[in-house]
Image (tube, rainbow, N blue to C red):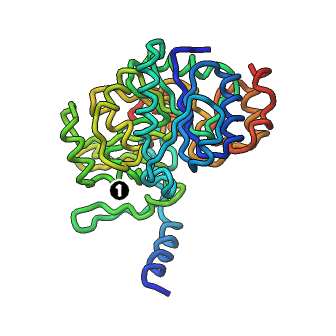
Amino acid sequence: MSDRLLKVVVSHLEADAVDEHLAYLATLCPGPILLCHGGTPERFAAVRWPRKRFLAHPGLRSPAATFQTYDEALEAAHEVLEADRRIDAIVVLEYDQVPLAPGLDEAVLALLEQTGAGLVGKTAVDRTATNWWHRVRYRDDPALLEHLRRVSVREDPTRIYGCLGTGFAMTREALAAYVAVEHPDGIYNELYVPTLVHHLGFRVEDVDAHGDLYAHVRFEPSYTPAEARALRDAGVLVVHPYKEPLAQLGDPAAAG
Amino acid sequence: MSDESFKGRLTRRLVRVAPWQRCEECGGRLFRAWIYPSRGQIKVLGADGDLVPVVRADFESRTRIGFRHVDASVCRRIREGGRP
């Protein structure tokens, strides 16, 4: 259990599925959890979890991997941290990133402390001079480049970072600096979040360069329940993507 | 049948028989591609497929451009401390 890490869960699912997910997570990884719901207002209203925020940005309803932004979610997380000084950091978990055993919080906090980074994430690296699709499409984006020139403390304000949009963790300080900036609208989150954190003067570190915590966090394909259970039995802490009912993973109270 | 779809089909056929490009750090296969100069650029025909990993391109010497994995989870050398 850790009171020092806020888990920011991003979901768009039906209320029952969301509540089941959060109950599973709270049992397996106790500690503060903020739900950020990007689905319909009706689904959001029906969610019973008390600490919740509706994400209204239309980018979240656009085709996958296009204009999704986490600015609202990160601002909501920052409000939670402002009200609770015990929390040192946040980790953003999309609904299909599923812990399999206790220990995710401690592993994430240890990684932030060990690396001294402001942000750690899956493949969170400098993507300048790569063929990454999002880097290519934003390479000459005037709104992003002008924004970075304005806020960057780095020698080269055109550096572009990227990371997977789930599983990234940020320190309190990096989050505060992030939300203090006025953001251009709708820059894709997998590019914008690590890029801005870098340009605000924080280190961005790749989880995979520091251990195997995210060895089974991948873009696709989805894990089956049998695969997830086998990985749990082998000691794996977390998988992504897992989109099947959580009940098929067994009782989280018995895990670990 | 549009010119574009013909071009796309032709490109896919060409890429299918292109040489494998490898990560200069770990030696692992990256993607099949034909590489050639064109109007001040180096074209990498084949570096945009769905299964192509994210790679970094850089001058490794004054006359040589190398490709490297970006993802440490698939590149042994990055995990061992090599350059991402």
- Judging by the rendered image, the residue that carries numbered circle 1 is A137
| x 38%, y 38%: residue | A193
- Give the x, y percent position of residue A30: 64, 19
Q: Residues within 10 Å of mark 1 (few under 14, many from 20)?
A: few
- Return the residue found at the far bottom: B1
The image quadrant that residue A112 belongs to is: top left
In the rendered image, residue A113, in percent from the top left (x then y), is placed at: 44, 15
Chain where mark 1 sits: A
Residue under the image location 57 percent in, 31 percent down: A214
A125 or B53: which is nearer to us?
A125
Q: Locate the C terminus of chain A and report the quarter of the image it occupies.
A: top right
Query: B21 or B8, which lies in front?
Result: B8
Task: Report x, y in % for residue A180.
Answer: 30, 30
Query: Residue A42, percent across and down?
Result: 61, 48
Q: How many numbered discs, if any?
A: 1
Taking the image as shown, residue A222 lies to the left or right of residue B8, namely: right
Q: Is residue A117 above or below residue B18?
A: above
Residue nearer the viewer, B53 or A152: A152
The residue that appears at 41% across and 31% down in the rendered structure is B82
Query: Which quadrant of the view contains residue A37?
Result: top right
Q: Nearer the viewer, residue B7 or B27?
A: B7
Element at label 1: helix
Residue type for callout 1: Arg
Horizontally, is B37 left or right of A237 in the view? left
Q: Residue at x 39, y 36 (%)?
A: A125
Q: Residue furthest top?
A: A86
Q: Quadrant of the N terminus of chain A?
A: top right
